[in-house]
Amino acid sequence: MTTTREGPITTTYNEMADVVKFEAFRFFRLYGGEFDEWFAQANEVFVDAFWSYDREEGSFGNWLRRNLRWKLMDVVQFIAYRHKRFPYVELLDEMATIDNEPLRHLDSLTEDAQLVVQLVLDLPRTLAIEIDDRGGKPRNWRSVLRQYLLGMGWERDYIDEIFAEIKHAL
């Protein structure tokens, strides 16, 4: 048994599929990326809009279009913020290897902790500028590194564990 407000969700989706595809294509054309990703985001927005729809708000088509534009624009803003703050998120993979002889005792660290140590020792220019802009103190290093790692998708608690592991090793 399906509980719906306008009929089965599949029927409603089939009626509004053109709207979902149109908005996904519109954002793909305006902001680039991959159409499949925009379409997947638009489908998620459809499901959210379907379950949050209230008949007193007006027609479902208008509700859906408004939700699609708002939430897809949120995705655009998130991507823009991430690229503005950290234009080179992939730098961890491209960092040059350095001589780790003085840090041999850090071999006991987990792989992610070693990546953070490597990041500190071979700091990308964008992060160095951000640290200097904030004052260049140790707390600024920590907050910029934390923000960088959050931008890569790491969880706050995990970052805290990594920092504690590095502190214990030093």
Image (cartoon, rainbow, N blue to C red):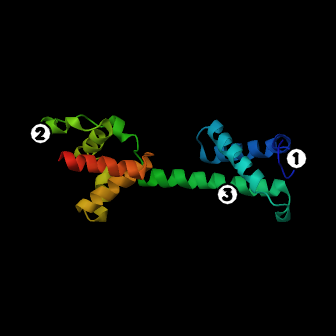
> Looking at this rendering, what residue extends furthest in the front direction?
1
Q: Earlier in the sequence, mark 1 or mark 2?
A: 1
Camera sees residue 86: no
Q: Which residue is mark 1?
A: 7
Q: Is residue 166 left or right of residue 35?
A: left
Residue found 26% across the figure and 65% down from its top? 135
Amino acid type of the residue tagged 2 in the rendering? Pro
Amino acid type of the residue tagged 3 in the rendering? Trp
Kindly report which numbered mark, 3 or 2, lies closer to the viewer in this rendering.
2
Q: Is residue 12 left or right of residue 142?
A: right
Where is 38 relative to 50, above or below?
A: above
Where is 158 relative to 142, above or below?
A: above
Estimate the x, y position of residue 165 in percent, counting from the top left. 26, 46
Rounded to the nearest whole Å, what is the CA distance between mark 3 and mark 2? 52 Å
Q: Earlier in the sequence, mark 1 or mark 3?
A: 1
Q: Which residue is mark 3?
A: 70
Amino acid type of the residue tagged 1 in the rendering? Gly
Rounded to the nearest whole Å, what is the CA distance between mark 1 and mark 3? 25 Å
Estimate the x, y position of residue 55 in percent, counting from the top left. 85, 61
What is the number of the mark on residue 137?
none
Q: Which residue is mark 2?
A: 102
Where is 138 relative to 88, above or below?
A: below
SS category of the residue bearing label 3: helix
